[in-house]
Image (cartoon, rainbow, N blue to C red):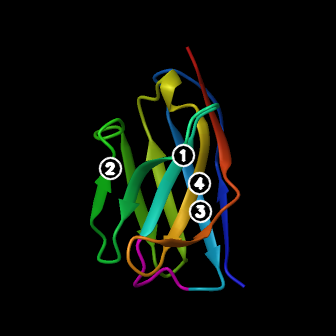
């Protein structure tokens, strides 16, 4: 059984930083793309960034230059470092493991990030 569990969320003031972790069990992350997504209250879930299997990353324009994704294939962990946080970064953050094509096969339950102004 594949499980993803996010951690590290919390309440932070605008301009602050948070580091999220995603622990994956049941399937190695090596060879798979890993994505971070978020959902703000009343809004649809949106893409935050991706760590490709080869280690390269891409980000949504809204977080580019502020967020950074890293991965440790040996530990089966994915990380999201968030700096210069803004109130509009508030939401539930999810990590997901990619599957065939553009599909994501497995999702974590999410962790709440709240940025106060």
Q: What kind of element bears circle 2? A: strand
**Cα separation between marks 3 and 4:** 9 Å
How far apart are the alpha carbons under marks 3 and 2? 17 Å
Circle 4 residues within 10 Å: few <14, some 14–19, many ≥20: many
Residue 94 numbered mark, or none = 4
Residue 56 screen position, x and y as percent = 27, 66
Sooner in the amino-acid sequence: mark 2 or mark 1:
1
Q: Are marks 1 and 4 in contact (CB under 8 Å)?
A: yes
Q: Which residue is mark 3?
A: 22
- In front of the other: 57 or 99: 99
Q: Is residue 31 magenta?
A: yes
Between discs 1 and 3, the one toward the N terminus:
3
Which SS class for mark 4? strand
Q: Is residue 53 magenta?
A: no
Asked which quadrant contains residue 34, the reply is bottom left
Image point (60%, 36%), residue name = 91
Indicate the secondary structure of the residue bearing disc 3: strand
Give whichever of 66, 47 is nearer the camera: 47
Query: In which quadrant of the rendered image does the N terminus lie?
Result: bottom right
Helix, strand or loop status at disc 1: loop
Rate crowding at label 2 as few (under 14), some (14 to 19) or many (20 or more) other CA atoms within 10 Å: some
Q: Which residue is mark 1?
A: 45
Query: Which contiguous range is marked in magenta?
Result: 28-33
Q: Nearer the viewer, mark 3 or mark 2?
A: 2
Image quarter where the C terminus lies is: top right
Q: Earlier in the sequence, mark 4 or mark 2?
A: 2
Task: Classify 42 as above or below 7.
Answer: above
Q: Nearer the viewer, mark 3 or mark 4?
A: 4
Residue that carries the numbered disc 2 in the rendered image? 59
């Amino acid at each position: 059984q594949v499980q993803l569990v996010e951690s590290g969320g919390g309440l932070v003031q605008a301009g602050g930083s948070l580091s999220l972790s995603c622990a994956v069990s049941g399937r190695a992350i090596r060879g798979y793309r890993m994505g971070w997504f978020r959902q703000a209250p009343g809004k649809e879930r949106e893409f935050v960034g991706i760590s490709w299997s080869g280690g390269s990353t891409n980000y949504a324009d809204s977080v580019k230059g502020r967020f950074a994704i890293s991965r440790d294939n040996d530990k089966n962990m994915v990380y999201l470092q968030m700096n210069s946080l803004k109130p509009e970064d508030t939401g539930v953050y999810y990590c997901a493991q990619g599957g065939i094509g553009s599909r994501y096969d497995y999702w974590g339950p999410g962790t709440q990030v709240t940025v106060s102004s």
